[in-house]
Image (cartoon, grey):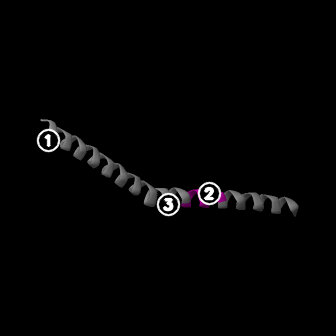
Amino acid sequence: MMKHFTKGFIFGVVATASAVAGAVFSFKKTVVEPIEDQESRFEENRKRANRKSHSAHHG
């Protein structure tokens, strides 16, 4: 009886850990990465505008 409980408990722990890992991965893909992409785009545009501004004043 204890053997079945132990197997079930271990399976439950592994299944729960897998579900949590999947949720974290999904959250990262749908929320974190788009924000990071947007920030990097803004940063690139800022750099480009800064270079353009400097060349316009020094050229």
Instruction: Write down the region rendered in magenta.
Output: 17-23
Q: Residue at (65%, 57%) from the top-left corner?
A: 17
Mark 1 or 3: in front is 1
Q: Is residue 18 magenta?
A: yes
Q: Which residue is mark 1?
A: 56
Closest to the observer: 5 or 34?
34
Q: Give the left or right position of residue 49, taking residue 40 as reference.
A: left
Residue type, label 1: Ala
Instruction: Give the percent coordinates (x, y) of residue 28.
Output: 48, 56
Q: Is residue 58 magenta?
A: no
Q: Residue at (82%, 61%) from the top-left corner?
A: 4
SS class of the residue under badge 3?
A: helix
Q: Give the left or right position of residue 19, taking residue 54 as reference.
A: right
Choose the circle earlier in sequence order: 2 or 1.
2
Residue 47, located in which quarter of the rendered image? top left
Q: Residue at (71%, 62%) from the top-left corner?
A: 12
Question: Quadrant location of the N terminus?
Answer: bottom right
Crowdedness near tag 3: few (<14), some (14–19) or many (≥20) residues, C-alpha within 10 Å: few
Q: Is residue 52 above or below residue 38?
A: above
Q: Which residue is mark 3?
A: 27
- The CA span between labels 1 and 3 is 43 Å
Choose the circle earlier in sequence order: 3 or 2.
2
SS class of the residue under badge 2?
A: helix
Q: Give the left or right position of residue 35, taking residue 27 as reference.
A: left
Residue type, label 3: Phe
Q: Which mark is residue 28?
A: none
